[in-house]
Amino acid sequence: MKKILAIDDNEINLVLLNQIIKLYYSDFTYLQATSGKEGIEMVLKEKPEIILLDILMPEMNGYEVCAHLKGNSDTRHIPILMISALGQNPMERTKGLNAGADAFISKPFSQDELRAQIDVVLRIKKAEDLLRKRNESLEVLIKDQTTKYLQSEERFLQISEHALEFYWELDSNGIFTYVSPVIEKILGVNPEDIIGEESYISLFQLKPMKEEKTVLEENFLNKSSFKDFEIELKVKNQEKKWLSVSGFPVFDKNDKYYGFRGVCYDDTQRKQAEIALKKSLVQIKNYQKKLKDLNTEIILVEEKERRRIAENLHDSLGQTLSLAFIKLSSIVNEKYTPYVEKTINEISDLLNKAISESRTLTYDLSPPILYELGLIPAFKWKLEEIEEKHGLQTILIGEDQKIGIRKEFNIFLYRIVTELLNNVLKHSQADLVEMEVKKEKKYYYITVRDNGVGFKKQTSKKNYLNGGFGLLSITERLDSIKGRLEIKSAIGKGTKATVIIPTREG
């Protein structure tokens, strides 16, 4: 309930005011006090909407009461309407207004004048209350926003201190107007030494005098955005730092250019890891080359050992078996009992078979024809052997061709071709095998074709080459002579395998 307080030492005046209030302001509660001290106590307790205050009172006059109430933060907003017979005196009115009164009315007064003054004061009070509430709400909002901003700024600073990037702003001349504090952590420079003093050219250690400008400089000059441009810097301790720089031009609402904003990310760790990785890759490649060279040497040593064993078989075991066969043959014509004669014939057959098998073993280990006559005769002998043993028709095209690679690598090609021919025998179900040797430009092409069942290359190539040394063996041997293998096949259309090697082995 809204309240109106009247302070007057005259009971008649209080009764008159009560009647007027009841008549015109029925929604207000009327309160009264007969002295200044009592009035102040009631104001503090009841907080009325308006105070009607007499000036001439004992102990404490109206000016003193008004000054006291206006000096208290809890009551200063309550409007005071002074009512006094002294109101006709300009000096007294001025004195009352200076004490803090909001309006002044002289006795005797008309009811209409009093109503008008009260209405004016209440309207002013209502407007002031609304404004005060809005100010209070605004203060709360500002305080809340300020708190949030400070919290956000604190979070940002905490994150920034641990981030590997710093933010920057440039004016239209390329001079730094802002650099985030993290730059000191990354580059060891104080932001205060940069802002307003240093340009992006000097900080990023660019060389503006050179004819060819970097992408970074071009974008600054053209006022265009750029992203993840890498720069290499030397910091104070002479260590290298790599920054990934991104930026964009800034324009005002009238499209007037006034600078750049951007971010620099410390890319040093990634760059150092990349450099270390490249070094590791180089080392790995060197190791791989050494391993390949070592593998080649091992294979060559293996072939030499095969040849030595083959020669021993031929020179020792082969000769011994041949001599035994000759000596046994010399007594065949003698007269023996049927049992002895049968035994001699069986031994003779066994020796003949052993001689044949030792010869085959010798050729399998290391074919003498390869070292004595060369690759093409060795290929021809192998095809003839296949034709004789397995009943396949064989054709050799390019019999007059010569393959001029290092002599010790001839065995590699022979083993590769032998492996391809063995796979034809195992998997193709062919009745025709064709080998072609030709030279085109800087390469030799040795092709093995069959008219067998073929296969789907993507699913069965492994199966086609899984016999003996298989694809791994062929690949390793071809790596040694810088060659490659190409295979073409289709279901029901046979298979074509081509060995391609350079004419000059490096």
Image: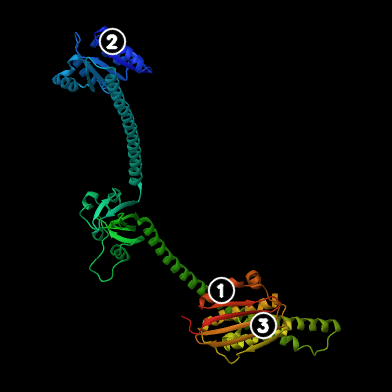
Question: On the rendered structure, is 438 left or right of 222?
Answer: right
Q: Is residue 401 above or below residue 363?
A: below
The number of discs equals 3
Cα–Cα span, label 3 and label 1: 29 Å
Q: Can I make out residue 152 in this image? A: yes
* Front residue (pair 441, 393): 441
Q: Quadrant of residue 313?
A: bottom right
The residue sitting at 32% across, 18% down in the picture is: 48
Quarter placement of the N terminus: top left
User: Given the image, on which type of amino acid does mark 1 rest?
Assistant: Thr
Looking at the image, do the residues carrying marks 2 and 1 touch, with CB atoms under 8 Å apart?
no
* Front residue (pair 229, 403): 229
Say few, some or many: other residues with alpha carbon within 10 Å of mark 3 (under 14 / 14 to 19 / 20 or more): some
User: Given the image, on which type of amino acid does mark 2 rest?
Assistant: Leu
The residue sitting at 23% across, 22% down in the picture is: 103
* Residue, disc 2: 14
What x and y, as percent, mark residue 358? 67, 80
Q: Can I make out residue 466 in this image? A: no
Question: On the rendered structure, is 214 left or right of 390?
Answer: left
Counting residues from the start of the chain, the first of labels 3 and 1 encountered is: 3
Question: On the rendered structure, is 330 left or right of 308?
Answer: right
What x and y, as percent, mark residue 415? 60, 78
Circle 1 — which element? helix
User: Given the image, on which type of amino acid does mark 3 rest?
Assistant: Arg
Which of the colour schemes (rainbow, by chain, secondary structure, one colour) is used?
rainbow
Counting residues from the start of the chain, the first of labels 2 and 1 encountered is: 2
